[in-house]
Amino acid sequence: MPPATNRRARDGGHPRRVAQRWRSGARTLAALVLAGGALAAFAASNDPPGASRGEPAAQQSAGAFSAALILARDDQELLGRWSGARHESVDADSVRSIAAGGRASAFVVFGGCAPDASGRCDVTMRLRVKRPDGTTAAATPPLEVWQHKAPPAARTLQLSAQYLKIEVEPSDPAGRYVVAADVKDHVSGASLQLATSFTATR
């Protein structure tokens, strides 16, 4: 069954939200695409959890373009710290486990996107969430990482303009879930495949 999608714009300059729910029999996984991001430096302590399983690492680079996939426990807390950091680093340990009823938000942190002739970047991502049995629980359309905007300043990184909020529902199976991101710089042509994981617990 295709995902049911509800789009609405919030007043007062608040982020546009795209709510989606994927269903597979009695199993559901709720996800919410939101907008956010503010310029700052970034210090991540994310080990590549899939490296021993032949999965892409959580951090990759291609030339000057680099990106990392993180799972934040509290999106608003991260956004607040990020926007207030200015040129200081922001520690963002990636979530490793989520209890039933809990949430995490998948962000891409990036730097070095190539500007086009007008000086603007064009970077998008597709996100996927796979269940412990390998089936797909969620898959997004192309989302904005950084489009129609100037590149981040030299030696600084940026939070993706949109991110995916994932909720583990009581009906979701326990076990290891893989979150993957295909990140594309449409100006330079660079593509990065990123992956991280979390364990859903009861």
Image (cartoon, rainbow, N blue to C red):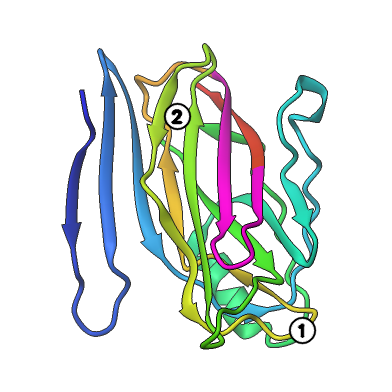
Q: Which quarter of the figure is the N terminus placed in?
A: top left
Could you tell me residue 41's position as x and y percent?
A: 74, 76
Of residues 17 and 85, the one drawn nearer to the viewer in this rendering: 17
Which residue type carries mark 2? Answer: Ala
Q: Which residues make up the magenta segment?
A: 175-193
Q: Is residue 59 left or right of residue 166?
A: right
Of residues 60 and 176, the one drawn nearer to the viewer in this rendering: 60
Q: Is residue 183 left or right of residue 40?
A: left
Residue 151 image-quadrant placement: bottom right
Q: CA distance from mark 1 to mark 2?
A: 41 Å
Q: Badge 2 is on which residue?
A: 100
Could you tell me residue 196's position as x and y percent?
A: 66, 38
The answer to if 137 sits in the magenta stretch is no
Residue 172 image-quadrant placement: top left
Q: Are marks 1 and 2 in contact (CB under 8 Å)?
A: no
Neighbours of disc 2 within 10 Å: few (<14), some (14-19), many (20+): some
Is residue 103 visible from the viewing direction of this image?
A: no
Q: Residue at x 22, y 29 (%)?
A: 2
Assign a secondary structure to mark 1. loop
Q: Residue at x 78, y 67 (%)?
A: 64
Is residue 149 visible from the viewing direction of this image?
A: yes
Q: Main secondary structure of the magenta part?
A: strand
Q: Badge 1 is on which residue?
A: 154
Circle number at residue 111: none
Which residue type carries mark 1? Answer: Ala
Lower sequence index among marks 1 and 2: 2
